[in-house]
Image (spheres, helix red, strand yellow):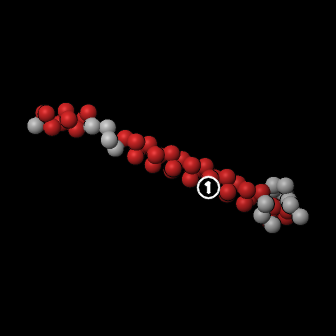
Amino acid sequence: MTQLIKAFAKDESGVAGIQYGLFVALIALVTAACVTGLGIIFSPSARVTGVGIGVE
């Protein structure tokens, strides 16, 4: 049983997949934040409320 646990602890075959998954999640989070921020800046109500640059 201890040999099985030691072999499992040394196995790193899934680590790369987890890292890629975390990178994709981070990129998606940053992209969503940027798109939301740009949506607030360029929204039509930004000119009325004075928020953002008010593109005409």
Instruction: Decide if residue 16 is on the left or right side of residue 37.
Output: left
Residue name at image x 32 percent, y 41 percent:
13
Q: Is residue 49 above or below residue 18?
A: below
Residue under pointer 1: 32
Q: Is residue 11 above or below residue 43?
A: above
- Estimate the x, y position of residue 42 in percent, counting from the top left: 79, 60
Residue name at image x 40 percent, y 42 percent:
16
As rendered, which of 28 and 53 lies closer to the eye?
Answer: 28
- Estimate the x, y position of residue 39 in percent, counting from the top left: 72, 60
Instruction: Rate crowding at label 1 as few (under 14), some (14 to 19) or many (20 or more) other CA atoms within 10 Å.
Output: few
Instruction: Decide if residue 30 is on the left or right side of residue 44.
Output: left
Q: Pick out the residue farthest to the right.
A: 56
Instruction: Decide if residue 40 is on the left or right side of residue 20.
Output: right
Instruction: Decide if residue 44 is on the left or right side of residue 3.
Output: right
- Estimate the x, y position of residue 27 in percent, counting from the top left: 57, 49
- Looking at the picture, which amino acid does disc 1 mark? Ala
- Estimate the x, y position of residue 19 in percent, counting from the top left: 44, 42
Screen quadrant of the C terminus: bottom right
Q: Pick out the residue farthest to the bottom.
A: 44
